Amino acid sequence: MISSDFTQGLLAQGRDSKILLVVVDGLGGLPDPRTGKSELDTARLPNLDALAASGSCGLISPLGPGFTPGSGPAHLALFGYDPWKHQIGRGALSAMGLGLDFRTGDVAARLNFCTVDNQGRVTDRRAGRIPTEKCQELCAKLEAIRIPGIEIAIAAEMEYRAAVVFRGEGLEDELSDSDPQVTGVPPHALEARGKGSARMLEVANAFVDQARQLLAAEQPANMVLIRGFGRYPVLPQMGEVYGLKALAVAGYPMYRGVASAVGMQTVETDWHLDQELEVLRARWAEFDFAYLHVKKTDSAGEDGNFDLKVKLLEEVDQFVPKLLELKPEVFILTGDHSTPSVMRSHSWHPVPLVVHSPVAMPDGLPGFSERHCRAGSLGLIPSTAVMALALAHARRLEKFGA
């Protein structure tokens, strides 16, 4: 049974055409007060500018006006899934992306190694972005945690992030996060938000208490924040919904997790663009649809590093011709959400989108940016419409009605 949020799935037809979706994480931005220009306006993007002239452009909204999305919901929307209906804890996506033993009935959560002062106040939510190797060492230390009746699996994700899976009787995922999202205050106390979550609250508190003791002598990562509790997701699969054999190329595990949840085949790779491109080239002939994820732009935005985000956008632009050499019938480049450097966080602002195909309406725009894409022929659309556009441009949607 196809989910009701996949109208286009009812019209999908098989055809020998290929779609490449490139998601530049945190793509959108806001003007720098020093110049009045956003990161995209500031960057030199000759290849994306050429696509904006020859393709169709617009802006996408992941959750609707005013709502700031996490990366999981924003990606689900891009893949055509209603993110309000299909809510998945980020911990579940990280656990799937890391290949942890994660099953129906388990609860996963995301860990952020952080720094706290001697009064327990968070001074750095990311512990200085410790290297992944250090994160792996700290995860090994946390393997000493013991909770009666509970099996625990932990794995490093990237830099300061990790994931944990809890297995045992009576576990539910309706818990609040301990991450206060700001510094200068203690981690939030965890709270049960569902009637059946009392046991999970007990388990999570025991985990955090033991982690505090095990990490007390470490620097800078001397504590963990726990967030994004989630059970194993069961979603309609892309092959069923769209008739596509889909590949995900993402260096960051969480994005492999969300791709796996919707039925894409995933490949473990580094998050550097050249290595992701190498994997994509090697597997391109096997698939109808490929999703390529670019992570570092989002990290630069979250760090408030405007100039670095500009530089990374320029690096993405240099890869565009190499991606087009694969000759996809449909080439789409957008972001999952905006991460303006001036805000140092995800935001609700619409995200630029370009669709390039032989049947795309050429907008003739002078550049690829928030400002230019606002004038594009696609207008402002929900992120959930991107897959319908992809299928239509690939001539994979049948006519509706007589």
Image (spheres, rainbow, N blue to C red):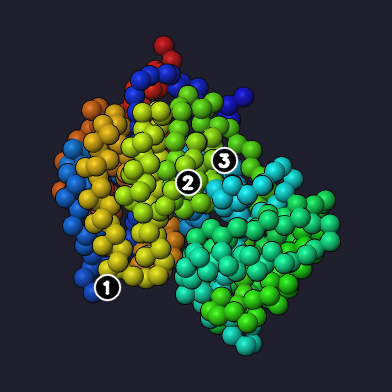
Residue depicted at 40% across the width and 48% down the height: 293
Q: What residue type is disc 2 on?
A: Glu
Q: Is residue 331 left or right of residue 174?
A: left
Of callouts 2 and 3, the N-terminal one: 3
Q: What residue type is disc 1 on?
A: Pro
Which percent across, then down, holds residue 349? 39, 57
The quadrant in which the N terminus is found is top right
Residue 189 visible in rendering: no
Q: Is residue 382 left or right of residue 123?
A: left
Which percent across, then down, holds residue 205? 75, 68
Of callouts 2 and 1, the N-terminal one: 1
Residue 280 numbered tag: none
| Along the line of sight, the residue nearer the viewer: 288 or 221 | 221
Which percent across, then down, holds residue 80? 48, 37
Q: Which residue is mark 1?
A: 33
Q: Residues within 10 Å of mark 3 (few under 14, many from 20)?
A: many
| Along the line of sight, the residue nearer the viewer: 59 or 311 | 311
Residue depicted at 64% across the width and 42% down the height: 233
Residue 268 numbered tag: 2
Comparing labels 3 and 1, the label whose residue is closer to the camera: 3
Q: Is residue 166 left or right of residue 381?
A: right
Q: What residue type is disc 3 on?
A: Ala
Q: Which residue is mark 3?
A: 261
